[in-house]
Amino acid sequence: SGPLKDINFSVQEGGGPRILHQFILEPPAVSFRVSGEKDGIIDIEQKTGILYINGSLDWETKQVHKLKVESLDATGNVVKGPCDVTIYVEDINDNPPKFNQTIYFGTVRQNSRPGKPFMYVHATDGDDPKTPHAQLSYSILHHFPNPYDKMLFQIDNKTGAISPSRTGSYYLDPQKQDTFTLVVSVKDMAGMTNAFTSSVDVIIFVKESLWKAPSTIHIKENSTQVHPLNITKVQSNEPGVIYDIFEKEKLPRLPFSISENGDIYVTEPLDREEKDTYTFFVVSKDNMGELVDKPLQIHVIVDDINDNPPVCQKELTVIEVQENEIGGSDIGTMFATDMDKKDTLNSRLRFQIISQEPEFPIKDLFYIQQDTGVLQLTGRSLSKRESATYFLKVQVSDPVFKTICDVEVHVIDINDQIPIFENSDYGSVTVAENIPIGTTLLEIQATDGDEPATGSSLIIYQVKEGDPNDTFIIETDSETNRGFIKINKALDFETMPEYNLVINATNPEPLVPGVQYNSSSFTTFKVFVTNVDEPPVFLKPVYKTEVSEDIPVNTLVMTVEAYDPEGDSVRDSKIVLKGVQGKYAQYLACGKILFLQKSHLLGRRWTCSGGQQLTCSRLLDNAAQKSKAFLILQLLDVNDNPPQIATDNPTFFCYPVSGGDRTLIQAIDADEQLFYSKFTFSLADEMNTRNNWELSKFNATHAYLSPKHADFEETTYDVAIILNDNGNPPLVNKVNLKVSICKCSSENSCF
């Protein structure tokens, strides 16, 4: 309530009768009056000043009501006013959204781009569009049929644009399902709760994609038509796209292009022999350069025409034929090629013999299979004696071209002749058993009628019988086929006094079937061996043993044995010592050898044959024949030499003697190093020695001698040193070392 004045009210629509305001009377006013857009539901009580609504406001009918209010006195005159009273009607969500169609129909292409709209649905709401009451949100409630876990379609919740989902772009196929029904829902209140909802059916028809690769394109090679030449066309599912080509292979040039409307052209004639297939891709892009459709692979095959003549595989084809090949035998193949497409009539080759030189003994000796090029003999075998070579001209043709190829047929001799000896028996020969190895006993000769200088005519001689130990060998002169029988191993009358040899002659090349070696390829030869008085033979060529150098006199050191090949006895034997003076060994019966003197008198240091070895030769005599064997006696060292001081250089100290002076002395031993690998040095227990000198070890064979003071009155001293070789047994030796005290030159030597 309040005094009369201008005032505004906001009132929600609907809600029924209600009081808006009460104006207070101000004297002399006794009543109120209202005029304006009352619409039959807005009024004021004259006496009380109550402004009220007697009904429901409707925002959709009228959003603003403008009124004039006045106060009147008792006479009806205006005391105050008119004052403006404005009532603003506020909207409430009292209108559900409505689609502008009761059913929608749309068409989508297979493989359409996901998210690209192909249709729209639209709904309206009667509520205030400035409020959420009229803000609409679209969604897909149901999807019939729905063969996949994910929706094939999607809708923009604000615009109502329907497009394929990623799943739909991949799976939509009119061959599998060409019609889908979507139940599309729209909500006001921007899709929030307590909103009105409406729905509508959307029928979608799936059509085959316009964007598809054409079937394989065939283009004839070397076309004479005007280029560029249209060969196919592609079309995107979306209008206004930009087409482009890119190649799969990195070619120097791609002889294809595409126009702005998707027409594909070949830009020049193609050559199948240069390249028989092409593969490239066509893409569609939007104005931003983004791909609209998946790239299409275009496959082009260049069809062959007969534009290549046959080519002989070789400039000259050489075929070798043996004499015994029978009529009808395959003797070789004539090969030719054609660059036209394989397995087509353009590359089908046919063969024909057009000439033969010489035409002897008959004109048509050869036949060629027209489709394979296989050469055959017509009816008779060839003979090298008639002709060694035949020259053929072979025509090779395809349906358009002809080529002449050269063929030479060489007739090869076969091994149909056996070697024949000039003599079936070469008699005999007598030789001594000591004939040298390699001696030629006999020359033999066989002949062969096959072609000379071939494996069919070369003769190999072998002893087939009568030589179990390979005592003989037969060598062949390959130029003359002459054989030489030679001694291969030493003859022995006592073992084999006579040989009855059977010799055969063969070829390295096998004989042809039906031909065999016979008695003409065999001969005989006898060898008689005469006895020769041979020297006795030792069982061993060398006898060797080892003894210590302290071996006792008359010790048996070895036994040797010999025999006579003829069975005679060995009547006389003796020992000759080489490199040693005097007689130190003796031969006894049965080949026993004794030492006669102390071996240390010989000494390990005697230089005999073999260094530290005693080499002897034993002579055996059975009449005029003698033999010898080597006796090697290896003397082993024992520790029988005491150690000594090496005296190669004088030992001295320069005067005056200083405390750091010292000299290196060396111990030596005549025995093997085994016995003196480690010497022990010590000073003898003598006053003169121990008062003036001291020893310190350097290594196993050397020690340092040092003066103990600098006051030396004499110029020469004898220093007694005890040496021990630590051998087995150990040998100890006392050695007096002379040491000089002298004035030294600048070169550090005494003078």
Image (cartoon, rainbow, N blue to C red):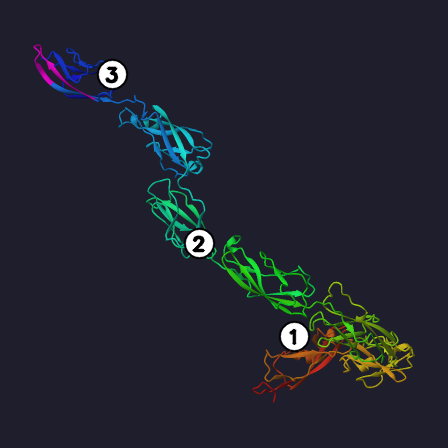
Image location (x, y in percent) of residue 415: 72, 67
Q: Nearer the viewer, mark 3 or mark 2?
A: 2
Q: Secondary structure at mark 3?
A: loop
Q: What residue is pinned by disc 2?
A: 221
Dot 1 falls on a residue whose secondary structure is strand
Left or right? Give the position of 353 relative to 677. left
What is the quadrant of residue 115 in the picture?
top left
What quarter of the picture does the C terminus occupy? Answer: bottom right
Region in magenta:
64-81
**In the rendered structure, which amino acid carries the disc numbered 2?**
Glu
Using the image, determine if residue 621 lies above or below residue 509: below
Kind of residue indicated by mark 3: Ser
Residue 216 vs 72, above or below: the answer is below
Labelled disc at residue 696: 1
Estimate the spatial distance between the alpha carbons at disc 1 and disc 2, rounded to whole Å. 107 Å
**Contact, CB < 8 Å: mark 3 with mark 2?**
no
